[in-house]
Image: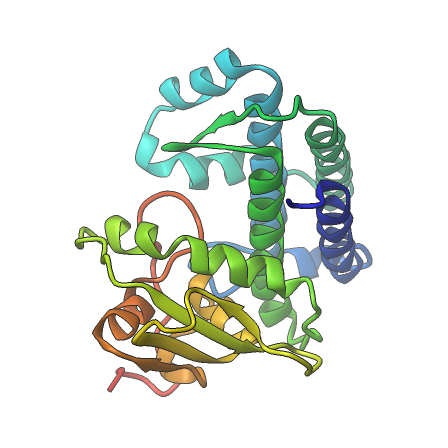
Amino acid sequence: MVDLTALLADLAAESEQLDALVAELPPAGWERPTPAPGWTVAHQVAHLAWTDHVAHLAATDESAFFASVTSAPDPSRLVEDGAESFLAPPPALLARWRAGRAALAGTLAAFPPGQKMPWYGTSMSPASMATARLMETWAHGEDVADALGVRRTPTARLRHVAHLGFRTLGHGFAAHGRAVPTAPVRVELSPPAGGEPWVFGPADAADRVTGPALDFCLLVTQRRHRADLALVATGPVADEWLDVAQAFAGPPGDKREPAGGVAP
């Protein structure tokens, strides 16, 4: 059973870490380009604020949530248009993000047990939504850190991202138009601070992925190319998974190119 209170505390801590990274930026800092083409630091924060907003709608007003989807001028640009619509001068954008994430956390904490809220192509429990928000906050925080030339210290909160990355194995294949494998995969990851490995999947699985937890999280959020990571895939399913892994909803994103150029 997931401890929702602890999960929401981790989400708050992840948000506060990113907040501290941008809160004192001068206006020019908010305009710095990030690795996501066309997105500045401001776009990254606006995206998080917009997604918190629609998640709050999904949890409190299903009709309004569905209307936000069906009324979109171009559904294929829903994410991009959402971020654009939430752009504002840095103080207003920061205030909007803070208020929105606080409202969502309060709503998730009080959500009726056993019920789910709609989401894009699926439905979510409060714990699943909180995990997804933590994953996105961490991933977009990586984009901001890259833009600012900051190296963040990974934390034990990455376990949530790693677990979500494992659970979405089938989604990654399906999103790329490939058959969802039936063979199980074992994942064994080295935690950022050392200690016992984080393990997911059956111990006797022939297909395996091993390596640093940070690298696995960077892969499943598509923040690094597999060629730049110390992940080892054993077996055909595991090997293909590293090409299509995707912990977020929706169609495949524009994957990062290898740091050294063309992938081997």
* 131 relative to 195 in the view: left or right: left
Q: Residue 198: x percent and y percent?
A: 57, 71
At 52% across and 40% down in the image, what residue appears? 83
At 29% across and 69% down in the image, what residue appears? 243
Above or below for 51 versus 206: above
Q: Residue furthest top?
A: 63
Q: Residue 118: x percent and y percent?
A: 47, 25
Residue 145 visible in the picture = yes
Quadrant of the frame with the N terminus? top right
Specify the color scheme.
rainbow
Q: 86 or 172: nearer the eye?
A: 172
* 234 relative to 119 in the view: left or right: left
At 76% across and 40% down in the image, what residue appears? 98
Residue 142 occupies quadrant: bottom right
* 56 relative to 249 in the view: left or right: right
Above or below for 230 versus 257: below
Q: Residue 44: x percent and y percent?
A: 58, 51
Above or below for 100 versus 220: above
Count of numbered circles on the image: 0
At 30% across and 72% down in the image, what residue appears? 238
Residue 33 visible in the picture = no
Q: 16 or 241: nearer the eye?
A: 241
Quadrant of the frame with the C terminus? bottom left
Q: 98 or 207: nearer the eye?
A: 207
Residue 260 occupies quadrant: bottom left
Q: 47 or 176: nearer the eye?
A: 176
Q: Residue 152: x percent and y percent?
A: 69, 73
Above or below for 71 versus 231: above
